[in-house]
Image (cartoon, helix red, strand yellow):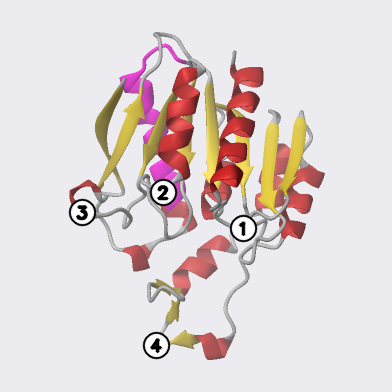
């Protein structure tokens, strides 16, 4: 069963969809990429597939993201990793209220969302899936900064505070310190995050781990067959480690 859910984070109303499984079933919270939202192609597909496997899911749009009436509040240019981690923790709180008794939580993060779910270091999370996730995000060169902003190819802009904040987090250390299972999935044609970043994340993970590099896949796993592979890998992972 799917229903809309709203919760607050940093004074902003965050909007999502919770997919409830049987009482007491495990649940997976999803964190999308920098410019994505809960409506990105893989998120509804992942939630539906997890549901068929008896696992609940929460997909939500981080503050400043989303489209139309389902967009979450906030301004995109104010994004920080700390803010997104706060959103993720608030999402865990919200789904714990919506699905009491679940107790076994997993998290999927895509691209910047992978940094969020790892960097949060939330002890409630038992298993991770990191999709096309960077280990680091370098600051832009001085000539790429205009009046204190870095402009993305989409036209969206980020304050330099975004890069200063990201630099405070050691994502490799966060993955190394995580005691649970870690799935790392990357496309070998990712033109945004080099596949070497996936190798670094996989290399430091200490618990049960798996690295899957999908031939031909881009950063978004845009091709249907690549997206289906990602969904299948994640469902298999959480079935193995959340039950």
Q: Which mark is residue 69?
A: none
Determine which quarter of the picture holds residue 97. top left
**Is the residue under label 4 in contact with that under label 1 (CB below 8 Å)?**
no
**Is the residue under label 1 in contact with that under label 3 (CB below 8 Å)?**
no
Task: Identify the element where label 4 is drawn.
Answer: loop
Q: What span is in magenta?
A: 84-102
Is residue 176 highlighted in magenta?
A: no
Is residue 92 highlighted in magenta?
A: yes
Q: Which mark is residue 147?
A: 4
* Callout 2 crowding tier (Cα within 10 Å): few <14, some 14–19, many ≥20: some
Q: Where is mark 1, residue-wise?
A: 218
Q: Residue at x 49, y 27 (%)?
A: 49
45 left or right of 131 in image: left
Cα–Cα span, label 3 and label 1: 27 Å
Task: Please tell me whether residue 145 is drawn above or below residue 123 in the rendered image.
Answer: below
**Is the residue under label 2 in contact with that under label 4 (CB below 8 Å)?**
no
On the image, the x and y values in percent for residue 199 come to 78, 51
Task: Identify the element where label 2 is drawn.
Answer: loop
Cα–Cα span, label 1 and label 2: 15 Å
Task: Please tell me whether residue 209 is drawn above or below residue 11 in the rendered image.
Answer: above
On the image, the x and y values in percent for residue 39 come to 36, 46
Cα–Cα span, label 2 and label 3: 14 Å
On the image, the x and y values in percent for residue 181 come to 70, 29
Q: Where is mark 3, residue-wise?
A: 68
Cα–Cα span, label 1 and label 4: 32 Å
Residue at the farthest right position: 203
* Callout 4 crowding tier (Cα within 10 Å): few <14, some 14–19, many ≥20: few
93 left or right of 215 in image: left
Cα–Cα span, label 3 and label 4: 29 Å
């Amino acid at each position: 069963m799917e229903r809309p859910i709203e919760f607050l984070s940093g004074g902003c109303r965050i909007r999502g969809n919770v997919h409830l499984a049987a009482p007491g079933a495990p649940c997976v919270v999803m964190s999308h990429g920098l410019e994505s939202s809960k409506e990105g192609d893989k998120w509804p597909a992942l939630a539906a597939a997890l549901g068929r496997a008896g696992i609940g899911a929460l997909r939500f749009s981080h503050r400043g993201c989303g489209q139309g009436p389902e967009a979450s509040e906030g301004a995109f240019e104010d994004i920080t990793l700390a803010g997104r981690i706060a959103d993720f923790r608030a999402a865990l709180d919200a789904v714990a209220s919506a699905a009491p008794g679940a107790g076994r939580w997993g998290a999927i993060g895509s691209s910047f969302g992978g940094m969020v779910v790892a960097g949060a270091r939330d002890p409630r999370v038992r298993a991770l899936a990191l999709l096309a996730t960077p280990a680091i995000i370098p600051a832009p060169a001085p000539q790429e900064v205009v009046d204190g902003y870095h402009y993305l190819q989409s036209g969206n802009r980020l304050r330099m505070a975004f890069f200063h904040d990201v630099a405070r987090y050691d994502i490799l250390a966060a993955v190394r310190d995580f005691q649970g299972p870690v799935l790392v999935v990357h496309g070998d044609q990712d033109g945004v995050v080099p596949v070497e970043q996936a190798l670094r994340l996989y290399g430091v993970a200490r618990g049960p781990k798996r690295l899957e590099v999908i031939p031909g896949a881009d950063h978004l796993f845009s091709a249907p067959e690549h997206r289906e592979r990602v969904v299948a890998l994640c469902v298999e992972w959480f079935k193995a480690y959340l039950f």
